[in-house]
Amino acid sequence: MNILVIGTGAIGSFYGALLAKTGHCVSVVSRSDYETVKAKGIRIRSATLGDYTFRPAAVVRSAAELETKPDCTLLCIKVVEGADRVGLLRDAVAPDTGIVLISNGIDIEPEVAAAFPDNEVISGLAFIGVTRTAPGEIWHQAYGRLMLGNYPGGVSERVKTLAAAFEEAGIDGIATENITTARWQKCVWNAAFNPLSVLSGGLDTLDILSTQEGFVRAIMQEIRAVAAANGHPLPEDIVEKNVASTYKMPPYKTSMLVDFEAGQPMETEVILGNAVRAGRRTRVAIPHLESVYALMKLLELRTSKSLWGNPP
Amino acid sequence: MNILVIGTGAIGSFYGALLAKTGHCVSVVSRSDYETVKAKGIRIRSATLGDYTFRPAAVVRSAAELETKPDCTLLCIKVVEGADRVGLLRDAVAPDTGIVLISNGIDIEPEVAAAFPDNEVISGLAFIGVTRTAPGEIWHQAYGRLMLGNYPGGVSERVKTLAAAFEEAGIDGIATENITTARWQKCVWNAAFNPLSVLSGGLDTLDILSTQEGFVRAIMQEIRAVAAANGHPLPEDIVEKNVASTYKMPPYKTSMLVDFEAGQPMETEVILGNAVRAGRRTRVAIPHLESVYALMKLLELRTSKSLWGNPP
């Protein structure tokens, strides 16, 4: 397939490289890293897959520069305030282009699906430890599983082809009939550990869990209740399993904390805000989520004031 | 009366100076500021009461140095981890010495009352904007009201004498039959704004209230519910009044935020922890308070790790 990856951060670079490895023709839209990627490609160091230099078929600053539209466009950017996803996709899709959204959070698809009502929308969820260490340099530390499914549900031939390509490239490429439920499932962990790592001023997962397990569980249970009320019942033991597996993980610094410390926008709205709104809509009691969300919004307000040179 | 003030921070210096002004014989225990206070006394700049230099009858490092025990000992230190209040009082009281505790929070009296079962314990609650700007230098910006009452209830002759002295010195000195209820009443405001100012990374009261009024109200309502369940029903409109008066105040930086920014221990346990424990004991639903308390404990853990040179 002709594939376009928008975004040469950690996620876009890593998954784009895997598709190129399996023989697909992969081009990239790179904005801030354009010069480096154009000149040298993208160097991937991987703890599990070896090293690889990904040389895209084309490197452009904007999809408008491309002569032909791709069969598939992977949008690999964080869904944060100011990210103009529809604008980025506008020149990147023909009517028969599949749009693949790979990012964290809940309800990340409706905006794109509404803007491109005739396109196939594929929703992707990555379970991976990968970092962009410099322009055009990616460090893949661990994991890599990518779940893919049509939005709001189902598995098309295109989803199967993509999942098979990722599987061939050496990671778990999973086609799932219900990607929306999978998003809620991942949110159970994300909604607890991401904001708590930031609001605590920078604790890792083990410090959080071992000192405030009850609080972590309360947040996870509320996500489970909201998911169920929104048509996505999750396994009864999901909180138990998340707690147990987090105790077994090495102490982990969340992606939201990495963004916060780097002064980057955080995925507060898609991880926490959308879950809170779904809870409000369905009148689920979510006082712990509401508290954490309110505090994240206060912290973001404080951060924005610092950026604008107006501390209290 | 012969009065001993333990602590020459903002509170001890200010209220000690007022008692000296009205003719009482006031000595002080000063630890970190001993040299300055011994040499020069304490200089009070006041926005409402004029300037005044308070020259204590005696300045000592420890109450053990005093030849006679005072009629009244005012303990004016923050109730934070590591504050050995009983140890500080041990040499400062005879059987007939009245012990006056001036500090923030809920349930600050039981430990002292248990250690000195035969002494009169007077509990004091200050409504004041006052700061120690340097050793022996105090800046009184606004307010000054001091509520005094016997613990757990009642008004003794000694309470009346003290309240009258403060009134004579130019502030509101109020003797109250029920100081414990007054503490819960003050806690309505404190439990909301103090931790939120810290967890937000440094917002003032107006930023917090104008963007997260619902969250502030939820915390305040939970304090009211806990107070009621613990035998201290508060006025029905107390939340409304706190919200309205905070909107009218100039934007205010809370004392807990001042402590946090200065790297000082915070009054988390007496303002928030004791309220949470009272709520748990009486099985009141306090999910917002539990959330804020858990986050404050995480932040304190993070801070302690930084202090010990062990960031994650």
Image (cartoon, coloured by chain):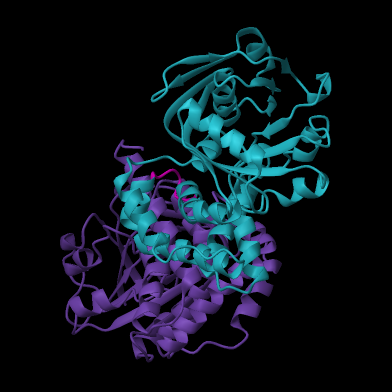
Chain colours: A purple, B cyan
Residue A2 visible to the viewer: yes
Vertical side of A32 occupied by A9: above or below: below
Task: Give residue A270's quadrant in the image.
Answer: bottom left
Q: Position of residue B304 (x, y in %)?
A: 66, 43
Residue shown at 67%/69% (left/top)?
Answer: B281
Residue shown at 80%/26% (left/top)?
Answer: B69
Residue A129 visible to the viewer: no
Residue shown at 65%/79% (left/top)?
Answer: A240
Vertical side of A103 occupied by B27: above or below: above
Vertical side of B246 occupied by B282: above or below: below
Q: Which residues are magenta?
A: B199-204
Does the stretch in magenta take in A11? no
Count of numbered tags? 0
Left or right placement of residue A133 versus residue B264 in this view: left
Q: Position of residue A271 (x, y in %)?
A: 42, 68
Farthest front residue in view:
B157
Q: For the N terminus of chain A, which image quadrant? A: bottom left
Q: Position of residue B107 (x, y in %)?
A: 66, 53
Task: Give residue A244's quadrant in the image.
Answer: bottom right
- Between residue B281 and residue A74, name the one nearer to us: B281
